[in-house]
Each structure stands twice: as structure tokens, then as C-alpha cells.
Amino acid sequence: MSNIYSVTDKVLCDALNQSQVTQNEMRELFLSRGIIISKNTDRKLLAKNFSKLTQDYNDHQKIAEILGSEPRRERSTSRLVSNMPEKTILLKAADTLKKELTDHKDLCHVVADRSGMINVHITYMSTNFSKSDFKQVVKKQAVIEVEPTEDGYVIRRPDNEQTEVYENQLLAIVERLSKEKAIEEGKPISEATLDIQEISLENIDSPQSRTDFFTKLINGLEGYDLDDVTDAYVYHPKPEEIEEEDGETDIGVHVSKASLKGEGVLKSEEINSLYERGFYICKIKWRVKEKGADPNIFEFEAQFNDAQNFKGFSYIAKGIKKYKGGGEYNKTIVQLNDGQKLFFSRMIEKTARSIIIELNKQAQGKKDGKSHQD
């Protein structure tokens, strides 16, 4: 785990002047020094006087906890391993990862259930030095889910750099243990190399196909009808520089990103004009409505983090608007429970993978047709 460095008196004074520090918390800080303060004392004076006192690590940690920002919900991402070894190796790999993380002062525990799912719970410190001193370190919790499916094992995690490191550690351990077992059994080591598949259209650069991915996704959730698209982000890769006949490079204006917000975004003339100029959707926020009586509305967001190469797929179920009756809904969106989150994670991932397969087949068919014509 990482720790913040020692701060200056001025930084400490500025921190204690923030509204996040309540009067009760200020009183507790002074009481820890055996000093009683009045609630009528000016906040700036209190902050100035406390910052003059000698501070230790525990003082800084206490103030950091008061000022620390609450980590926001993160998008999820997943990969499919089609040739994952048996569960005993997975559990051994998870326990090995646990030991490695605890040796580095992170917290980790492994939970396996009867369905075959293995959850690796990790508590770690996330560092961001671009923030103010007492907000640079945030305690985060993450779960790496290893879930058996009919096509292999899905590895699901929060979409951030640190959990990607943990995931890669886990998969590296799994592969190492698999190769060790293959050697013991006299099998080829190549069979133990993990076949890892990601949701990506990196191999297809057609703007139409990439937009089709999202339009098929938002319309393809089984048991739900598309209600509306409220946000669409489009991307247009910058073309390679072309030299003119006189040898000079043509440097013109190029717009690579645009976003549209509102109602019926995909039906607007604006987005159609962007399509005509070579833009394609790289991120989308949409709502779906349950099929049947008294339908609730669910809101989702999905994107490719690398818009140019169309890889790094991630998504989040934003929440639910519950149906009140008489055609009316609650105004506020509430978070889904864990069971609902897992349900929609599976659905979005399964739908996205089937669309990738479909689009790849279409692209291959076009290539084959073109080669026959030639």
C-alpha cells in the first residue's frame, strides 16, 4: 500500500479550512492534543493554530480520511479464456496471488461458491498525485470475478490500470501452473498457453461496422426494448498525412471527436451528417424498458477506451427507474443490487461477443466475395 508524503504547514492549514472538515472533526483533532476549543472560534484561526503544532503520521492519516474523496463506481471490463484449466489450478493460482498481494501490504481474500465462480476480493490504495495532498491516496475495493461459462471462463474486473495489473498477475500464475502440470504429464507446453479473447473490432476499421456494433448492442438485450439513447460520442480517426505534388504536406482542420446529448440522439440529423463524414460511435449511453406489464427502465453506458483501435471495451449499469404506475416513473435513478449487476454484466458481455462474431463473419464474407471477383 502507498502512503502520502509529509505535507507543509500551509497545505495542512488550507486543508483544515475546507468545508469537508466539520466542527466536530475539528474539535476531535484538538482534543487529541488535550486542547478544548469553542464552537464560536473562527475556522481560519483554528486551522492556523493546529497547523503550527507538530504532526505525525497518524495525524496526517486521520485528516486524509476526512478529506478523502469517495471512489466513484467504475465501469467493468472482461476477457474470455477459452482453455482455462480445472478449478483446482484456478484456486491455487488465486491463493498464490493472495500471498503476493499480502506480501505487498494489500488486503486480499478468495471466495469460491458452488456454481464454480471464484471471486478475488482486493483492498488497495490508489494514488493520484495530480490531486491535492490529502486527496492523493484513496482506499479502493475491487473484485476480480472468474466465472465458468459454456465457452470457457470469463474474467471480469473494474476497468482501471491497477486491477488490470492484478488480473494479468493472476492469469500469468494460472498459465505457469498449467505448464508445470503439462510437463509433469508429458503433454506439450503449447496446450497450456491460455487463449485469451477480448471484445474488440481492432481488425475491422469500417466506420459502418463499428457503429453497427453499438446499434446492435443497444437493441440486442434479450427481454428488453430500447427506450432512448441520451448520449452518443463519435470518433473520426485522423487520416495519414498526404503530400501534395509540390512536396508540401497538406495540413487542414480535422475534428476527431464529437458528442451529442439529448433525446433521440441516434435519430438526429446531426449524427447522420457525422456518419457521412466518416465518424463512428465509440461510446454510448442508453435506456431500455422491460418487456411486459409495469416495465422498469434501466440505464447503461458502454464504450471502447481506445476509440481509434476500437478495443478496451467497458460498460456500466447506471441504475434503474422504477415504474410507479399510470405510465409514470420515479424521477431518481437508484443503483442496482449485486444480483442485478451480475445479470446485466453477463447479458451485455454475451451480446457484445455475439455481435463481434457476427461482424467478423460479415467482414470475412465481403473479403471472400471480393477475392472471387478479382
Image (tube, helix red, strand yellow):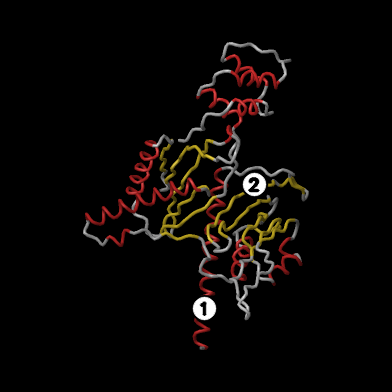
Q: Amino acid at mark 1?
A: Gly
Judge from the rendering whether residue 96 lies leftward or rightward of residue 17; answer left or right.
left
Cα separation between marks 2 and 1: 39 Å
Position of residue 202 relative to residue 338, above or below, is below
- Foreground residue, 229 or 211? 211
Residue appearing at x 45%, y 52% in the figure: 155
The amino acid type, in three-letter code, at marker 2 is Gly
Bin the neighbour count of mark 2 within 10 Å (Cα to Cα): few under 14, some 14-19, many 20 and up: some
* Left or right relative to 372: residue 66: right
Q: Say what secondary structure mark 1 lies in.
A: helix
| x then y, percent, for residue 199 | 51, 60
User: Mark 2 vs mark 1: which is more N-terminal?
Assistant: 2
Location of residue 83 in the rendering, given as x and y in whole percent from the top left corner: 37, 59
State the residue lying farthest toward the bottom.
374
Label 1 environment density (alpha carbons within 10 Å; few <14, some 14–19, many ≥20)? few
Q: Quadrant of residue 10?
A: top right
Please tell me whether residue 7 is drawn above or below residue 166 in the rendered image.
Answer: above
Of circles 2 and 1, which is in front?
A: 1
In depth, the one of 363 and 247 nearer the eye is 247
Residue ID for mark 1: 365
> In which quadrant of the rendered view does residue 34 lie?
top right
Q: Which residue is mark 2?
A: 319
Is disc 2 placed on a helix, strand or loop? Answer: strand
Name the spot of residue 182 as percent of width and height, x first.
26, 56
Whole-percent x, y for residue 152 in the image: 41, 58
Quadrant placement of the N terminus: top left
Res. 137 mark: none
Residue drawn at point x = 65 percent, y = 57 percent = 284
Q: Kindly identify the residue that appears in the image at 57 percent across and 49 percent down.
A: 75
